[in-house]
C-alpha cells in the first residue's frame, strides 16, 4: 500500500524535541521558580534540536514571561528573550495563540499606554481560541489593571 501523508499534529517530526516539549509543558503548569527554570531549559533544548518547532518557541516565551513572578529574574532581564521567542514562534506559526499571548507581556512592559489595545487583543485571542486558559488569566489581570473589575472576574 502507498504511504499516506499524515498531518503533523505535534509541530515537529523530531521525537526528542517533542518529548522535551511535553516535559516542559508539564513543569510549566506546576509553576514554581525552580520548575519553571527546568521547563525553560527543556523548551530551549527542544528549540535547539528543531528550530522550526513553533510550539516549543511559544512555550519558551510563555515560560520566560512568568519567570519574574516565580523566580529571581526581573522583567527587564527576561523581556528581550520573551519577545524573541514569541516572535520566532509567530514567524513559524502566525496563528499561534500561545505565542500571541506570550507577546502580550513584553508589549505591555514596553508601553503601558497600550493597555487598552492589549485588552482588545486579549478579547480577540480568547474568541479565536477559548480553550487556552493562560490567555484568560492574563487578559483578566490586564482588565483588573485597567479598572474593569467585573469583566476581569468573568475573564478569569
Image: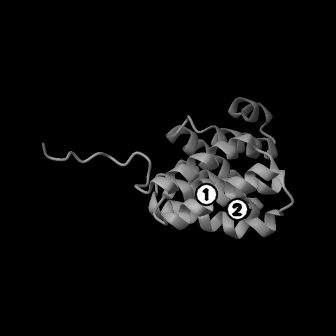
Decide which of 78, 46 is in the foreground and name it: 46
Percent x, y for residue 154? 71, 29
Is disc 1 placed on a helix, strand or loop? helix
Badge count: 2
Q: Residue at x 87, y 60 (%)?
A: 72
> Distance of mark 2 from mark 1, alpha carbons?
19 Å
Is disc 2 placed on a helix, strand or loop? helix
Residue occupied by mark 2: 106
Q: Is residue 97 above or below residue 57?
A: above
First of labels 2, 1 by sequence position? 1
Is the image coloured rainbow, by chain, by secondary structure, or in one colour? Answer: one colour
Residue 114 appears in view = no
Decide which of 45, 144 is in the foreground and name it: 45
Percent x, y for residue 134? 66, 42
Q: In the drawing, does residue 7 fall left or right of residue 94?
A: left
In the picture, the quarter occupied by the C terminus is top right
Q: Which is more foreground, mark 2 or mark 1?
A: 1
Residue occupied by mark 1: 43
Decide which of 96, 49 is in the foreground and name it: 49
Q: In the drawing, does residue 95 fall left or right of residue 99?
A: left
Decide which of 19, 122 is in the foreground and name it: 19
Percent x, y for residue 123? 60, 42
Percent x, y for residue 137? 71, 40
Q: Residue at x 57, y 53 (%)?
A: 20
Amino acid at each position: 500500500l502507498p504511504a499516506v501523508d499524515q498531518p503533523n499534529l505535534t509541530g515537529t517530526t523530531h521525537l526528542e524535541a517533542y518529548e522535551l516539549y511535553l516535559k516542559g509543558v508539564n513543569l510549566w503548569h506546576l509553576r514554581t521558580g525552580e520548575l519553571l527554570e527546568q521547563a525553560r531549559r527543556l523548551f530551549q533544548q527542544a528549540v535547539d534540536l528543531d528550530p522550526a518547532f513553533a510550539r516549543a518557541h511559544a512555550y519558551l516565551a510563555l515560560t520566560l514571561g512568568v519567570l519574574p513572578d516565580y523566580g529571581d529574574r526581573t522583567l527587564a532581564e527576561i523581556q528581550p528573550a520573551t519577545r524573541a521567542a514569541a516572535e520566532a514562534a509567530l514567524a513559524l506559526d502566525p496563528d499561534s495563540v500561545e505565542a500571541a499571548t506570550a507577546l502580550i507581556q513584553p508589549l505591555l512592559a514596553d508601553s503601558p499606554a497600550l493597555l487598552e489595545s492589549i485588552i482588545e487583543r486579549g478579547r480577540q485571542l480568547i474568541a479565536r481560541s477559548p480553550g487556552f486558559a493562560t490567555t484568560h488569566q492574563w487578559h483578566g489581570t490586564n482588565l483588573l489593571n485597567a479598572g474593569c473589575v467585573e469583566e476581569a472576574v468573568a475573564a478569569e
